[in-house]
Amino acid sequence: MAVNAEAHGDGLPNERPDPITTLRGWRRFVEAVPPHFELLPEAEWAALSEAARPAYNKARFDYHCGRVVLATPTIQEIEEQVGLTQLNHHDSIARRGLVVSGPPFTGKSTGLTQLGRAYELWIRQRYPSQDRISVVYVTTPPQCSLRNLVAEVARFLGRSPINPRAGFTNFVDGVGQALTEARCDLVLVDEIHNLDLPTAAGEYPSDQLKYLTERLPAMFVYAGINLEQSGLFTRGHATQTARQITLVKAGAIPYGPEWEGLVANLEAGLRLHRHEDGTLIRLDRYLHERTHGMIGNLSHLIQAGALAAIDDGSEAVTRQLLEVIRLPGLH
């Protein structure tokens, strides 16, 4: 059975955790224990009563719905950049930054959050007696202004509003002071492609981004869809900001041993009573063609297959079952 399920006092699982764009939700994410589930022996499973079986299956549903983190090339490359944070401690002007860019479903958000989680755990180990907010994680709302994005950082810190009528520079300075007091080192900004660009070349927000990174005492890590073509970091005055930024390109994983390893890891995580080990490995080429090598699509397909196998009683993920599962997006 699941050994780390959280529940309310009434015994029901907590279905609405705080989002990780809040401090409480982020800390819950950082401290979360990886999902774990052990299948019952065959005889005990077969002997489950009609009353007990739904609870057993629900626990397996929860396990398979747990966030799957695979060591993809994108995640590994992002985590290798954590040393940039330390460089920023010694440079108060030309602060380094990181941009993760690529198509949807290529693991950008997962890489971003895993970087933040790894860094915060490292800080906690290094400074166990200090109460810090070492990492801030926000997502960019649609058609968002940079001022509103800074306000999202303030809300995460619990400092909203910070003089909402102040000019942009004073507003940024107020958030910068809050970050300093929190001893924040990393600000993770997801979905940055949603930032509103008021001009064709995007010079105005790029100038503000440059000011932002110079005045706020933290390393900014941005993730978004195909940012190289957005103009946010590559056109006009944005080139000044681009010189201080490391670009990590997320993309499809080519078919080969690395892809087979990812499929094998996902298959090893299945908790089904009739699934034959190696079935998905033998389907690795089909899975690559079906998902176009996108790790997000692969995770979704196999997780959804596991849920369907529990629900229909087949207890095995087969190609026939996968064929009827739709992938996210307009396919």
Image (cartoon, helix red, strand yellow):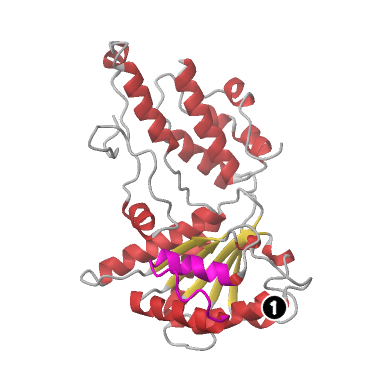
**Quarter where residue 176 is shown:** bottom left
Residue shown at 50% from the left, 53% from the top: 110
Out of 12 and 293, give the one closest to the viewer: 12
Outermost residue on the right side: it is: 200
- Please determine whether, in this image, residue 251 is positioned above or below residue 199: above
Residue shown at 47% from the left, 68% from the top: 153
**Mark 1: few/some/many CA within 10 Å (<14, 14-19, 20+):** some
Quarter of the picture holding the N terminus: top left
Task: Find residue 325 and report its horizontal and vertical position in percent.
Answer: 61, 27
Q: Is residue 242 magenta?
A: no
Residue under label 1: 204
Residues shaded magenta: 147-167
Outermost residue on the front side: it is: 165
Residue shown at 41% from the left, 58% from the top: 22
Q: Is residue 105 left or right of residue 84?
A: right
Q: How many marks?
A: 1
Residue shown at 64% from the left, 44% from the top: 293
Out of 247 and 258, give the one closest to the viewer: 247
Out of 310 and 274, give the one closest to the viewer: 310
Q: Is residue 71 left or right of residue 229?
A: left
Q: Is residue 163 magenta?
A: yes
Task: Find residue 274 and report its horizontal and vertical position in percent.
Answer: 43, 18
Element under label 1?
A: helix
Residue 278 showing in the rendered view = no
Q: Is residue 260 left or right of residue 204?
A: left
- Please determine whether, in this image, residue 197 is positioned above or below residue 269: below
Task: Find residue 83 and report its horizontal and vertical position in percent.
Answer: 44, 74
Task: Find residue 85 and report its horizontal and vertical position in percent.
Answer: 44, 76
- Please determine whether, in this image, residue 263 is positioned above or below residue 246: above
Quarter of the picture holding the C terminus: top right
Check disc 1 and give the amino acid type. Answer: Tyr
Residue 295 showing in the rendered view = yes
